[in-house]
Amino acid sequence: MSKTGVKYLEKLKLKKYRESEAKFLIEGVNILEECLKSQVYRKYIETIILRDEFTDDHLLDRINIAAPKAEIIKLGSSAFSKLADAVSPQGIIAVVRVPDEQLIHHEMHFSENEPETSKAIIALDGINDPGNAGALIRACHWFGLEDIMMGEGSVELYNPKVIRSTQGSLFHVFVKEGAHLKSELKNYHDAGYNIMLFDLETNIEFSPETFTELSENFNKFVLVFGNESRGISKDILNNQDYFRYRLRGYSQCESLNVSVAAGIVMNAYRNVFSK
């Protein structure tokens, strides 16, 4: 690869170029393995970049099977290091085009005509820490709640730290970026969803029994989690049609990490509504 080619790919480490080129980089064996398992993203792998000394014939065989059109390029250590973002690079990077959201939605089988006994959608309002966003996406994948909305002001989905924090879960869920949550939540409410806001300022405590009680009247939910410091936007919190809850604390600790809080809620949901 020429120096010009390396410089072009190096620009994909910056958000503005990822957006203008509609491409992003993924790095490391495990995350690439997850991308190769994805019914959608594996079709969008354009290039595999290997550091000269990289050797994993089994992985290369899987690449040839899952992404046969991907170009494979080798780079010296110096050129490769310009593209790497990890502290300890594993010697493999992939260039992936951003799939169309509607295609992901279709391939993930989120069809309005699909019969469901229960459904929960996760809405993230202004989550701007990449580690938190990635951990939330990973938790959603773990609990099988694979329909996610990231509201305006949230961190970019294809930020390298977000991708790394998801540990590849990103490639197995549907994430709608830049959602206007106020109107989206209204539409879901009008469609019969119970909108649940998790907020420290309310006195109503969430408990493991909450979903059991709600299940008498609802089987569709949007679970909303807010910004790490500001919480959920006031124009959403002030909607009297939505339910507000706080997680019960057992000490003087001021707050709980948003990804941990979301995991507690999702686990409670799954205890009542199994797949």
Image (cartoon, rainbow, N blue to C red):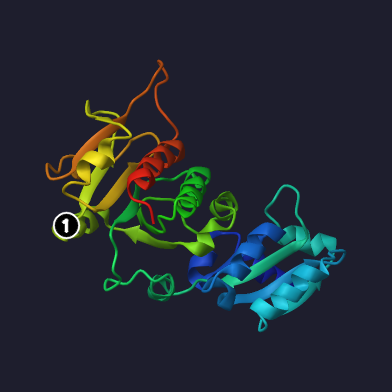
Q: Residues within 10 Å of mark 1 (few under 14, many from 20)?
A: few
Write the residue at 87% across / 64% down: 53
The quadrant the N terminus occupies is bottom right
Where is residue 135? Give x, y as percent: 51, 46
Where is residue 63? Give x, y as percent: 70, 74
Which one is nearer the viewer's eye here, 213 or 72? 213
Tell whether 37 sits left or right of 227: right
Where is residue 143? Give x, y as percent: 45, 50
Write the residue at 44% across / 45% down: 128
State the residue position of label 1. 192
Residue type for callout 1: Gly
- 234 up-or-down from 145: above or below: above
Tell whether 13 sits left or right of 211: right
Q: Residue lying farthest top? A: 252
Tell whether 97 sits left or right of 9: left
Where is residue 274? Give x, y as percent: 37, 52
- Tell me, yes or no, if residue 43 can be seen here: yes
- 227 up-or-down from 255: above or below: below
